[in-house]
Amino acid sequence: MDGEISFITSGTVTTPQGFLAGATYAGLKKKQVKDILDLAILSAECPCTGAALFTTNRVKAAPVVLSRQRLQSGKVGAVVVNSGCANACVGEEGIRDAAEMADLAARNLGVSPDTVLVASTGVIGRRLPMDLIKAGIKRIKVSRDGGHELARAIMTTDTVPKEAAVAVSSDNGNFVIGGAVKGSGMLHPNLATFLCFLTTDAPVEPELLKHALQKAADVSFNMVSIDGDTSTNDMALIMADGMADVTGTISPGDHQSEIFQEALNRICIHLAKSIARDGEGANRLIEINVSGAASFTDARQVARTIATSSLVKTAVHGKDPNWGRILAAAGRSGVEIVESRIGLSIGNICLVKAGCPVSFDEAEVAKIMGNSEVVINLDLNLGRSEATAWGCDLSKEYVAINSEYTT
């Protein structure tokens, strides 16, 4: 694959050409920190091709319902997003409030309301305070530098904003992909409360954009788990405005589509790992590499099962080399496992070979498990397929955060 992909220093969702953003503090979140933001708009200077993935939870928030309907046209001009209130499980009033948010943002930007999507995150079961929303949207001024504000505004229990951008150089031209995500708890594969906004100035054919987003999510966001809970509000949106100097339109099957997919995969994996690293109360990022599976589906399932195991997560938190928990999680994943073929290591230390324990220094393994990133390698020795999942340790702080979330 010919094409150079590199991360851009301080890159964000407005780094690609033609994208603007801005944010304000509307009063939706309890003001506890300096310069807090909770309401934002991301817009494009020209009409965009759009594609999105939404929560698989059967209980869907009003913004998800509205945005899915509007995106059927494949066109999007802006998205207005708030934190502090999920606008979920409040009946028809929630749909009306989401539509009014879009109308207000459209008026602010001077665009058609039908091209404006809505996203929300926060506490479920409470109506949006529309008076605060109305006043807040009027104050938002979008700019090329506003991506950093948007990344802060969408945070809930996140401790840091999560954003990035990659530059792509190839024989057919250069383009950029930018993104911002939020997510720290209520996170589980199948769109792991998760919001993601991606932008690109590459000219991408609509069907390719949709499939590329799904492929990227399958190797990144859908391989993240914090606590096993899938939110009512999950949404991953990508907007492509075609403003980059690229020859032709990137279409399925052409060489440029492979470069675009790889670049999108890289930024999504980077953002997914930033989510896992910032899990609620987390001290350590856990990376689970499963190899030697009979199929890619099997590899994904085993990796995801280990990532969601509370016993594995607590063992990592306690720096306890209790490797039996890892094998037990793999064994209940529902895929083909032959115990006598399993190999397992933590970091660079082998713990299990051909299904049997080997001698190792427990103190050395405990030391590795105390690192900020803990890598678990499981080889099933049944085939050539592999997959990687990410999670975090489970701490007392996680319990404290979630036992006091609305109080």
Image: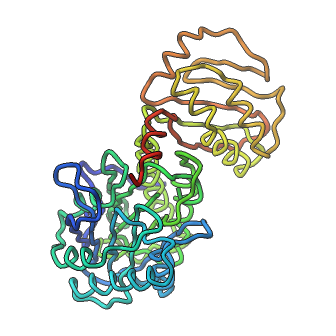
> Quick one: 404 or 85, which is closer to the camera?
404
Relative vertical location of residue 189 with respect to residue 313 in this rendering, above or below: below
Please tell me whether residue 131 is drawn above or below residue 197 in the rendered image: below
Q: Is residue 149 left or right of residue 1?
A: left
- How far from the left and from the top, in percent, is residue 326? 68, 30
The residue furthest front is 407
**Measuring 21% from the left and 83% from the top, which residue is drawn there?**
108
| Residue 209 in sight in this render | no
Quarter of the image where one finds residue 337: top right
Whole-percent x, y for residue 40 in the image: 27, 68
Q: Report the coloring of the rendering.
A: rainbow
Q: Residue at x 76, y 28 (%)?
A: 342
Query: Residue 317: horizontal and vertical position, in percent?
Result: 51, 27
Given residues 333 and 343, the one toward you in this image is 333
Q: Quadrant of residue 282?
A: top left
Q: Would residue 150 appear left or right of 118 to someone viewing this image?
A: left
Residue at horizontal 45 percent and vertical 54 percent from the top: 268
> Which residue is painted at 24% across and 74% down in the image?
132
Is residue 232 in view from this perspective? yes
